[in-house]
Amino acid sequence: MKRTDRIARYEKMLEKAALAARQMEEALDAYEGIQKDLRALEKYYTSDTWKKDYAADEKGLLPADLRRGVLSQDGIDHLLGRFAAIRRRMEAKPDET
């Protein structure tokens, strides 16, 4: 392999890795920033308040234009499960992924 080809090849690797590092840093910042909200969601989902809100929705007592994905049977549970899987993945040793 010619020297210039080798240098160009490794330069592309460097650029690709630098982009991945920036994206990972941004993703980690977002992940860390959402932890308080996740704890609040879990607390709400396991509370009597959620059950009452769910029942009110089932009875048609909420405005039709109110977004209420948070009241879906599985919405919060699936999201919390996804974040648990992300945590496990982040804690895994590199050779375990």
Image (spheres, rainbow, N blue to C red):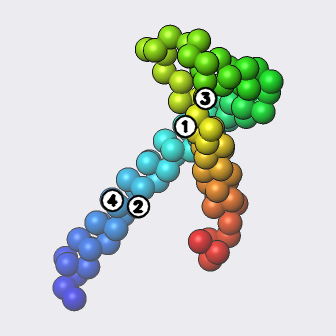
Of residues 62 and 86, which is closer to you in this image? 62
| Dot 1 amino acid type | Ala
Q: Secondary structure at mark 4?
A: helix
Q: Which residue is tagged 4?
A: 15
| Dot 3 amino acid type | Leu
Q: Which residue is tagged 2?
A: 17
Q: Nearer the viewer, mark 4 or mark 1?
A: 1
Q: Is residue 63 above or below residue 80?
A: above
Residue 86 lies, in percent from the top left, at 62, 54
Q: Which residue is tagged 3?
A: 71
The quarter of the picture where the C terminus appears is: bottom right
Of residues 21 and 82, which is closer to you in this image? 82
Q: Earlier in the sequence, mark 1 or mark 2?
A: 2
Contact (Cβ within 8 Å) of mark 3 with mark 2: no
Q: Disc 1 and disc 2: Cα gap in Å?
A: 20 Å
Q: Disc 3 and disc 1: Cα gap in Å?
A: 24 Å
Q: Disc 4 and disc 1: Cα gap in Å?
A: 23 Å
Contact (Cβ within 8 Å) of mark 3 with mark 1: no
